[in-house]
């Protein structure tokens, strides 16, 4: 059994002991509110609909969840309206990261029913981008230009904006644009955003910023700092394409812990853990709890065996 443990700054972790090794799971791990909502909406839809249910793009960035939706509930994903085998009677669920405006209409025009599982926080960012564009700001999105969330936000600014993800990119903003309206991908690190916004101030007359980093991201990055400071090794569980999972590993390493990013317990590199005394576990916002439990159980089984062999 694990127990809640309070350290100096009262941040709770759940701790387990296996042989000489302590395993500490961060308080904010696993599905965030937006992902949980989208998953439950999808499962409920699959249960009540007679016709086939699809998600538009993978619902979230976690391959195990996508596989489970397919094997347990028959929900597969498609990449566009033309991939719907039999649109009439089909239901399409829009993923948490959102889609450009008009996409839902394309599915409806084919005869499918659409359920929008876009996270409400992403929806707010899309609305800000739309508003800034209407108010004649040049929209700047700080984020990964290839990420579906960023693609959808840019589309709400009618595609007329600049996506930047580093200080060097600030130069990409057209120099004749004097009024900049800024929104941020939900999973970014605030410190980095601050640096980029500061650099923008040097080239514009007005910079209007909506801090659209999701509170879930902030909470988890604070946990990552704490876990990295309290443990010599950190295991980050999550999809390799999950933006917030990758950032957790970056934050943990920046605080001096050795970090491993794994998608499932089979990926754990025990060789790298052979001197570990305290192992912290972090998990991205799209990582299911059962996967965190499996990883914890695998670690406990391994270190208990090591202790028994001594
Ligand atoms: S991390 Fe935040 S924005 Fe992203 S799905 Fe979760 S609650 Fe929504």
Image (cartoon, helix red, strand yellow):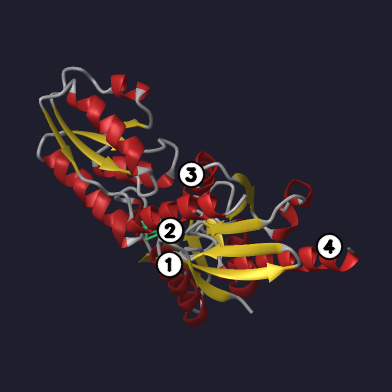
Lower sequence index among marks 2 and 4: 2
Lower sequence index among marks 4 and 3: 3
Could you tell me how far apart the alpha carbons at marks 4 and 3 are, in whole angstroms?
30 Å
Could you tell me how far apart the alpha carbons at marks 2 and 3 are, in whole angstroms?
27 Å
Residue 95: which numbered mark, if any? 2
Q: Nearer the viewer, residue 297 or 163?
A: 297
Q: Nearer the viewer, mark 2 or mark 4?
A: 4
Residue 167: which numbered mark, if any? none
Residue wearing tag 4: 306
Label 1 beta carbon within 8 A of ligand 1: yes
* Mark 2–mark 3 CB contact (< 8 Å): no
Q: Nearer the viewer, residue 103 or 149?
A: 149
Identify the residue at horizontal 62%, vertical 61% (top origin): 64
Lower sequence index among marks 2 and 3: 2
Could you tell me how far apart the alpha carbons at marks 1 and 4 are, in whole angstroms?
41 Å
Determine which quarter of the picture holds residue 220. Answer: bottom left
Residue wearing tag 3: 251
* Mark 2–mark 1 CB contact (< 8 Å): yes
**Which quarter of the rendered picture does the C terminus lie within?**
bottom right
Could you tell me how far apart the alpha carbons at marks 2 and 1 are, in whole angstroms?
7 Å
Residue 38: which numbered mark, if any? 1
């Amino acid at each position: 059994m694990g127990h809640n443990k309070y350290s100096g700054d009262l941040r709770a972790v759940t701790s387990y002991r296996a042989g000489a090794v302590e395993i500490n799971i961060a308080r904010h791990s696993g599905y965030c509110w937006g992902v949980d909502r989208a998953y439950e909406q999808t499962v409920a839809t699959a249960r009540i609909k007679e016709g086939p249910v699809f998600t538009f793009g993978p619902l979230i960035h976690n391959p195990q969840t996508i596989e489970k939706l397919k094997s347990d509930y028959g929900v597969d994903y498609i990449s566009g309206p033309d991939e719907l085998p039999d649109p009439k009677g089909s239901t399409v669920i829009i993923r948490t990261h959102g889609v450009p405006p008009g996409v839902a209409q394309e599915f409806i025009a084919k005869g499918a029913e659409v359920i929008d599982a876009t996270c409400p926080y992403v929806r707010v960012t899309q609305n800000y981008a739309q508003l800034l564009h209407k108010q004649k700001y040049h929209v700047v999105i700080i984020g990964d230009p290839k990420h579906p969330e960023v693609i959808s936000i840019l589309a709400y600014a009618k595609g007329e904006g600049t996506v930047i993800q580093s200080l060097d990119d600030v130069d990409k903003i057209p120099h004749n644009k004097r009024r900049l309206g800024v929104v941020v991908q939900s999973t970014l690190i605030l410190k980095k955003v601050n640096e980029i916004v500061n650099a923008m101030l040097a080239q514009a007359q007005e910079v209007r910023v909506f801090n659209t980093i999701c509170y879930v991201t902030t909470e988890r990055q604070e946990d990552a700092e704490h876990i990295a400071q309290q443990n010599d090794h950190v295991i980050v569980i999550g999809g390799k394409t999950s933006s917030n999972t990758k950032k957790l590993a970056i934050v943990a390493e920046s605080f001096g812990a050795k970090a491993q990013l794994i998608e499932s317990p089979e990926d754990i590199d025990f060789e790298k853990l052979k001197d570990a005394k305290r192992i912290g576990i972090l998990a991205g916002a799209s990582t299911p709890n059962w996967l965190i439990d499996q990883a914890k159980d695998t670690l406990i089984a391994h270190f208990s065996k090591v202790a028994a062999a001594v």
